Image (spheres, rainbow, N blue to C red):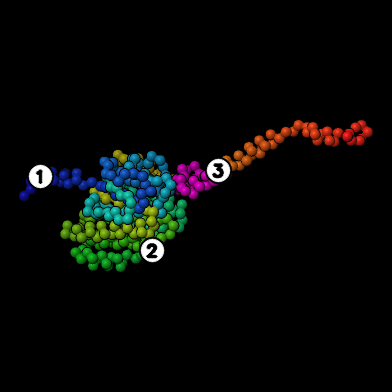
Amino acid sequence: MMKPTAMAVVSVLATLAAASQVTVSFSESKLVQGSMKDVSVEADVASLSHLAMESLALPQLSGVGRPLPIVADLIAHTNAFGFVLLENIDSGVSLQKGQYAFQKTLGLEDASSGQFTQLAHVLAKGIKQKHSQSVVSCSGVVCADMDKTALTSLSDAAAKEAALWSELSDLDKNNKDDAKFVSELANMRSVVESINSQKSGKGFFVSSISTLANLAPTKQTAALVAVSKTVNDFHRSLQAAYGRVGFQLLQLSGPMKIDIKVLSASMAVSRQLTALAANSSNASLPTPLTVESIAEYQVILWSSVILVTIIIFAVSTMTSIDASRDNLLYAKFLTDPNGRKND
């Protein structure tokens, strides 16, 4: 039997081994600038949200969060963005790259994870204000702060739950933890279905699974396989439906939380981003560059240059005209005092 001291050491090592991480994917390499090589940089939720805002060409703040080795392109923007957040599932879900051109995994700061619900709300609000016909779908605890009137209705998850009970035969319908997991996973599959069936303008899709820790150990492996399959379906469907897309998979070693030491800074960032989304029509806000805005600027610039050139040429031509008396013409019409022409 393991001694208490040894058990404590194992517990500490297990805690140290557990580490939150985020996998960032972009469907096309021109949507993002950065290396896919592993680097020892830890991301935070604010910087990841800022990356999504830049990618969707939404008004954003410079200097939000810590610098990332990934930067959204200034010209090429995504048509849709997806987030999946898994609490207490820091491993076991492998995101297949598939048709995505860029994929990178970074460490994730646990202390910032509690910001996610607020920042997801900010992103959803911003994309709805800029593109009113956009599809915004959300499921799970991450939807707590979202305006329900802005969300696209999800299909009834009852049929999906029934399929999951058959698929995961070890789970018990009478067990509340099993039932909660099945409900969350069925709702995530409803979000995937909305990706495939409700494409309209831009798209923003978010879903979460709270935990597998409450399931019996004998049930967790099969549950994890089902989660991994659904997450990869989400990832693949987003790219297939919208083409230019970004995706972030956040895998937390524990529940969402905010460290008291960074609480004030986190809330300040949330308030600033909320203000940006609420005032996205304000002319004083930074407007992301787009192909259309650059083309408009070029037309105005070169039209002005051509007009000024024409004016300068006209003025130069007029000033170069010889306004002095033409002697031959003058002599031709010169007359004598009697009014007769001279020969």
Direction right: furthest residue: 338
What amino acid type is highlighted by mark number 3? Trp
Q: Which residue in the protein does label 3 denote?
A: 302
- Front one among 212 and 84: 84
Q: Is residue 294 magenta?
A: yes
Name the residue: 36% across, 51% down: 28
Q: Which residues are magenta?
A: 277-300
Labels 3 & 2 near each other (Cβ < 8 A): no
Q: Position of residue 322 (x, y in %)?
A: 72, 33
Q: Earlier in the sequence, mark 3 or mark 2?
A: 2
Q: Nearer the viewer, mark 3 or mark 1?
A: 3
Q: Position of residue 52 (x, y in %)?
A: 37, 48
Q: CA distance from mark 3 to mark 2?
A: 44 Å
Q: Residues within 10 Å of mark 3 (few under 14, many from 20)?
A: few
Q: Secondary structure at mark 1?
A: helix
Does residue 132 appear in this view? yes
Q: Residues within 10 Å of mark 1 (few under 14, many from 20)?
A: few
What amino acid type is highlighted by mark number 2? Ser
Direction left: furthest residue: 1
Q: Position of residue 9 (x, y in %)?
A: 13, 43
- Front one among 228 and 45: 228
Name the residue: 64% across, 38% down: 313
Q: Which residue in the protein does label 1 denote?
A: 6
Does residue 147 appear in this view? no
Q: Is residue 143 magenta?
A: no
Q: Secondary structure at mark 3?
A: helix
The quarter of the displayed image where residue 82 is located? bottom left
Q: Position of residue 132 (x, y in %)?
A: 46, 56
Name the residue: 24% across, 48% down: 253
Q: Secondary structure at mark 2?
A: helix
State the mark number for residue 197: 2
Q: Nearer the viewer, mark 2 or mark 1?
A: 2
